[in-house]
Amino acid sequence: MLKERYPDRLMVLVLDNARIHHAKMVKEFLQEEGQCFHFIYLPPYSPQLNPIERLWKWLKDTVIANVFHKDRNDIIQAITRFVNYIHERPEEVLQRLGCAG
């Protein structure tokens, strides 16, 4: 989808070191499509460099930590409320994740 949307651009993707990011299919993809993509891998064990880790922490602190959920549906509803909250406040999300000034 990125290649279709930006056909004449070099795209730099920053990836963590999850095993799937080093899988055979990823290497094959780069061989076929490598001219328009450049992957930068974060160093191993560096959650401080990965904004998604801060999002997971925020979710856990808000929805899971010290909260009793009566059933699975209650957890799903709490997560849905959290997702809706962050979708409505992109600037706050960027600030909390350290991606904005």
Image: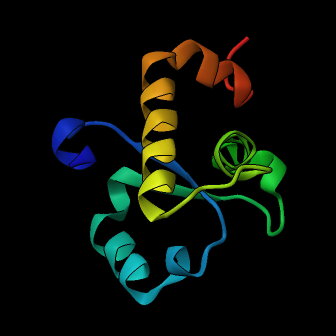
Residue 88, position as x, y percentages in the image: 43, 17
Q: Is residue 68 left or right of residue 80?
A: right
Residue at 51%, 18% (x, y): give it. 90
Taking the view exactly as shown, the residue that stands out farthest to the left is 4
Residue at 62%, 16% (x, y): give it. 92
Where is the C terminus found, in terms of image quarters? top right
Does residue 72 lie above or below 54 as drawn? below
Residue 18, position as x, y percentages in the image: 61, 73
Residue 77, position as x, y percentages in the image: 43, 45
Residue at 41%, 43% (x, y): give it. 11
Q: Is residue 84 left or right of residue 3?
A: right
Does residue 83 lie above or below 64 as drawn? above
Does residue 84 lie above or below 22 as drawn? above
Taking the view exactly as shown, the residue that stands out farthest to the bottom is 24
Residue 94, position as x, y percentages in the image: 62, 23
| Closer to us: 26 or 96 | 96
| Closer to us: 43 or 58 | 58
Q: Is residue 40 left or right of residue 65?
A: left
Residue 97, by quadrant, is top right
Residue 96, by quadrant, is top right
| Closer to us: 6 or 63 | 63
What's the image's color scheme? rainbow
Residue at 64%, 45% (x, y): give it. 63
